[in-house]
Image: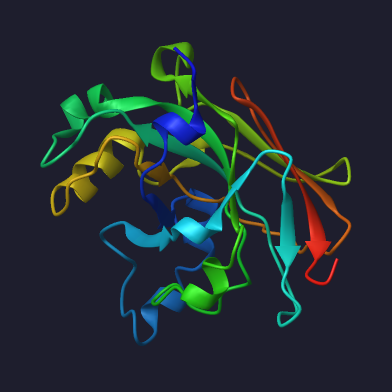
Amino acid sequence: MRRAVSEAAAGTLFGVALNYQGLLHSRLEEFQQPPYQKPPVKPVLFIKTPNTRNGNGDPVVFPATIERLQPGPALGVVIGRDASRVGEQDAMAHVAGYVIVNEFSQPEDSYYRPAVKAKCRDGFCPLSSEVIGRDEIADPHALPIRLLVNGEVRQQNSTANLVRRIPKLIAEISEFMTLHAGDVLITGTPEGRVDVKPGDDVVVEIEGLGRLCNTVVAEDA
């Protein structure tokens, strides 16, 4: 069953960094240096605060105080019922469905401490309008995902390349905190993020979920 995002996915937006194989592998040398010393062994989490919520067709404001802005195409997993200390084998029973997410951010210099100012600006997290029910997607780990800017494909990947699949994410996160119905797990953005500027039309496509469309506008527009 499909439901509006405003009803079914009104909870906390949890982002997972470094969850695409290509992105993680591109940073392995960096992770041998201080302060990391080794690659992360648990999910690298951040939160998109409520002010970041945005919708399909709504503008994304390019703040006047920043120099660069990057969209981040991602599959969002909507929690359907509370999950606490859930095992991988039972995790999918807690999923209501899926949404398209565009996780806008300023470029990051470090994954050790994701910057609130880079990720939590107003309107920096558009979500598609409907939650596509879990049973409508045969395999959420085999979905082509594309980013288009002004009609040109600028990024493409597949959820087949996730480092941690959805059941493992739910199990590892719910081990130390309860995920509540309506929360959204942003499962990660692929390597190769691109810059956008005011006036750009930005579209995220995920097979089976449709399209999420936004236009970047200058702050003084």
- Indicate the quadrant where residue 105 lies: bottom right
- Indicate the quadrant where residue 211 lies: top right
Colouring style: rainbow
The location of residue 110, given as percent across then percent down, is 48, 78
The location of residue 207, given as percent across then percent down, is 62, 24
- Indicate the quadrant where residue 40 lies: bottom left
Query: Is 102 rendered above or below residue 181?
Result: below
**Residue extending farthest left:** 85
Which quadrant is home to the C terminus? bottom right
Residue drawn where x is 36% and y is 50% of the image: 12
The location of residue 3, given as percent across then percent down, is 47, 21
Which of 99/217 is in front? 217
The mark tally for this picture is 0
Does 169 sit left or right of 210 as displayed? left
Residue drawn where x is 45% and y is 56% of the image: 50
Query: Is 77 rendered above or below residue 48?
Result: above
Query: Is 25 rendered above or below residue 100?
Result: below
Which of 146/39 is in front? 146
Query: Is 51 rendered above or below residue 109?
Result: above
**Residue extending farthest bottom:** 34
Residue drawn where x is 67% and y is 38% of the image: 56
The location of residue 200, given as percent across then percent down, is 86, 54
Which quadrant is home to the N terminus? top left
Which of 18/51 is in front? 51
